[in-house]
């Protein structure tokens, strides 16, 4: 199936919605200089095509008692699709894991973990991460301060007439808010 063409209006809509997800359609239409009906139609198409994958509230980690962020590198034994899938499923089920990436380099997985404090991380490390079968090395990097987080995706690479790579066919689309396994564990 051909990829969806992203035009200048789509980019403007996506830019606004990434910064202000609660924007009402009339306000969005005003910001992108479009009337409300065509604006809503474009938003619905972007959702149906899987470009907009959901909406949610962002919470302040410290305000909800999650003052420690740890970036964790995992090395595994037995590099196979089955092992990777099993580990991805296990990691994506852990609520402390905000993001999980399969990476190349010294580690096999890179996790972003949020916990209340160092004692909670120790419990998570010993009770959860180190009990995952095939995990043989864990390296923890504690964030001292976050300078930038959850920024909108840069869309400057999309020019008029650009095709969106990797657009799924309609039969493979998941409903809005679906969280794929841990391959790109988008709970971040």
Image (cartoon, helix red, strand yellow):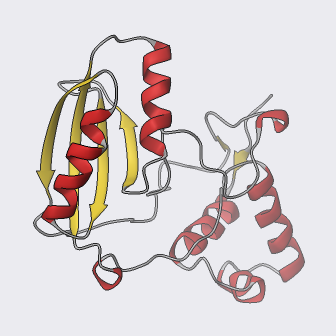
Q: Residue at x 71, y 49 (%)?
A: 50
Q: Residue at x 33, y 10 (%)?
A: 78
Which x, y percent locates residue 106? 17, 25
Question: Taking 78 as reference, is 1 above or below it?
Answer: below
Q: Residue at x 60, y 72 (%)?
A: 17
Occupied quadrant, residue 120:
bottom left
Residue situated in front as seen by the camera: 99 or 166: 99
Question: Taking 175 as reference, is 172 above or below it?
Answer: above
Q: Residue at x 69, y 37 (%)?
A: 167
Quarter in which the N terminus is drawn: top right
Is residue 35 at least partly visible in the picture? yes
Residue situated in front as seen by the camera: 63 or 162: 63
Occupied quadrant, residue 87:
top left
Residue 5 vs residue 17: left or right? right
Residue 59 vs residue 51: left or right? left
Residue 183 vs residue 45: left or right? left
Occupied quadrant, residue 100:
top left
Which x, y percent locates residue 86? 48, 26
């Amino acid at each position: 199936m051909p990829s969806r063409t992203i035009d200048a209006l789509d980019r403007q809509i996506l830019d606004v919605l990434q910064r202000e997800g609660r924007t009402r359609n009339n306000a969005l239409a005003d910001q992108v200089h479009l009337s409300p009906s065509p604006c809503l139609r474009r938003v619905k198409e972007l959702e149906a095509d899987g470009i907009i994958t959901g909406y949610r509230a962002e919470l302040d980690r410290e305000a909800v008692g999650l003052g420690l962020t740890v970036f964790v590198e995992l090395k595994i034994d037995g590099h196979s699709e089955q092992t990777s899938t099993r580990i991805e499923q296990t990691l994506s089920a852990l609520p402390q894991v905000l993001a999980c990436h399969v990476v190349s380099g010294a580690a096999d997985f890179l996790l972003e973990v949020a916990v209340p404090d160092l004692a909670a991380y120790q419990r998570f490390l010993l009770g959860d991460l180190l009990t995952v079968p095939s995990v043989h090395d864990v390296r923890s990097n504690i964030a001292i301060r976050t300078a930038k987080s959850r920024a909108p995706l840069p869309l400057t690479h999309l020019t008029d007439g650009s095709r969106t790579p990797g657009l799924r066919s309609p039969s493979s689309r998941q409903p809005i808010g679906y969280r794929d396994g841990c391959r790109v564990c988008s709970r971040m």
